[in-house]
Image (tube, grey):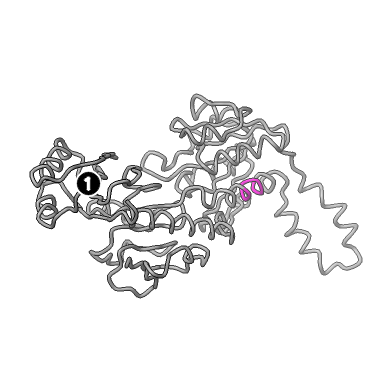
């Protein structure tokens, strides 16, 4: 029986997928096989040695010590696209909020409540201060064409906007889903120079931190608007406040408020609501659970942030799963040990990602404990386990 520890409240729609005859799921399990988490910070949490997988019901994994997990052979999953529609809808709302000064107008109207008899007249006199442009016919630059970026681009096209997309690493799946009407930008600088609105949809990394800064803002049209519901660190905070105060930019909408941003009138701070819908929580929980079950039961890896995608249809009765460092002759050493013990390999696949490799090896015979011990003793092998095909 597999044991799953939940570190947050997880949607029942996901938890119900675990068959109760094969899975024990609780928040207090001492030695789990896997951890299911949303926002709980695992950096300062002791992760038991029994854990072989962690699934994050969400896209970001900043709350998980990914490098330490990789070194231990713990596969970390996320759920890209599970909250894509929720974030996309908030981006569309942000386009309108940044243009029409809706929020300021609502707050101003609320302040008129004490002027009972004068409200209609005051509204007519004061409404002009909240005028703003329509988004139809304007140009939106979408930086990052993953699950969210593609949906934003396609819906902006449907709203009558011109859309430019930039993503040098766009996946095949994303390209298939992207509207043909979306124009391709060869460079980020070219996109910024042409856009009236810019929406960011990138992960935060050493290469993307501070991606939009004073140098990039100088390239943009006067009065442009920036929307960042991806990660706060993608935008240099001091530089964008300066650009707003000098009227180089008209508005900045962010899902990541800070004291400095809240103090700037031209910044619209949303309290991290990008994925805060019941539908997104359900979708992410379902994806996380399905990925965990596939990995635990058959060794398949999909949507891992630290190991390569790797899947193999299981037709043999026995399966060997090996995680090792991505160094020469690892597959040769593994197969030599199996051959020396007269174990016939029926199928094999090896995929690697950066420093680590993953092997799925299907065999006709059960792998004896002696073979497993020899494999574990090989320098460079991190983890070894076996699974049985329930219906070979």
Q: Relative to 388, is 5 on the left or the right?
A: right
Magenta residues, start to end: 89-94
| Residue at the far bottom in the pictured view | 28
Q: Relative to 47, is 257 on the left or the right?
A: right
Pick whichever, 137 or 302, lies toward us.
Answer: 302
Task: State the image coordinates of residue 176 (x, y, percent, origin top left).
Answer: 54, 32
Pick whichever, 100 or 63, lies toward us.
Answer: 63
Q: What quarter of the picture does the N terminus occupy?
A: bottom left
| Element at label 1 | strand
**Majority secondary structure of magenta residues:** helix
| Vertical order, 52 against 113 (above or below) | above
Task: State the image coordinates of residue 392 (x, y, percent, origin top left).
Answer: 32, 51
The residue under the point 43% across, 32% down is 169
Q: Name the residue under label 1.
A: 363
Task: State the image coordinates of residue 78 (x, y, percent, origin top left).
Answer: 42, 52
Q: Magenta stretch containing residue 90, yes or no? A: yes
């Amino acid at each position: 029986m597999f044991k799953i520890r939940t570190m947050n409240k997880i949607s029942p729609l996901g938890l119900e997928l675990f068959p109760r005859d094969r899975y024990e799921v609780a928040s207090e399990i001492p030695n789990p096989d896997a951890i299911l988490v949303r926002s709980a910070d695992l950096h300062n949490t002791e992760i038991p040695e029994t854990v072989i997988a962690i699934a994050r019901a969400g896209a970001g994994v900043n709350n998980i010590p990914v490098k330490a997990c990789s070194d231990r052979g713990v596969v970390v999953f996320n759920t890209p696209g599970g909250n894509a529609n929720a974030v996309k809808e908030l981006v569309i709302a942000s386009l309108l909020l940044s243009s029409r000064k809706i929020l300021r107008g609502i707050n101003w109207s609320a302040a008129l409540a004490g002027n009972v008899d004068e409200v209609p007249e005051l509204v007519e006199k004061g409404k002009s201060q909240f005028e703003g442009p329509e988004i139809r016919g304007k140009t939106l630059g979408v930086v990052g064409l993953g699950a969210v970026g593609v949906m934003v681009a396609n819906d902006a096209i449907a709203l009558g906007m011109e859309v430019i997309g930039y993503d040098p690493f766009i996946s095949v799946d994303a390209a298939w889903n992207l509207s043909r009407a979306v124009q391709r930008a060869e460079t980020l600088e070219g996109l910024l120079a042409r856009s009236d609105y810019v929406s960011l949809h990138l992960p935060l990394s050493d290469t993307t931190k501070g991606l939009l800064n004073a140098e990039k803002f100088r390239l943009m049209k006067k009065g442009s608007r920036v929307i960042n519901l991806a990660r706060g660190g993608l935008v240099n905070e001091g530089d964008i406040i300066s650009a707003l105060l000098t009227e180089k930019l008209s508005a900045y909408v962010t899902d990541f408020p800070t004291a400095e941003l809240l103090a700037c009138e031209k910044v619209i701070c949303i309290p991290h609501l990008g994925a805060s819908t019941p539908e997104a929580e359900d979708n992410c929980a379902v994806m996380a659970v399905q990925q965990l079950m596939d990995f635990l039961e058959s060794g398949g890896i999909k949507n891992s942030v630290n190991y390569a995608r790797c899947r193999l249809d299981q037709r043999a009765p026995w399966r060997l799963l090996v995680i090792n460092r991505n160094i020469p002759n690892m597959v040769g050493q593994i197969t030599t040990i199996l051959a020396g013990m007269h174990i016939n390999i029926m199928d094999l696949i090896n995929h690697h990602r950066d420093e680590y490799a993953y092997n799925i090896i299907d065999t006709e015979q059960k792998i004896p404990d002696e073979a497993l011990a020899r494999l574990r003793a090989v320098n460079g092998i991190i983890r070894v386990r076996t699974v049985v095909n329930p219906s070979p």
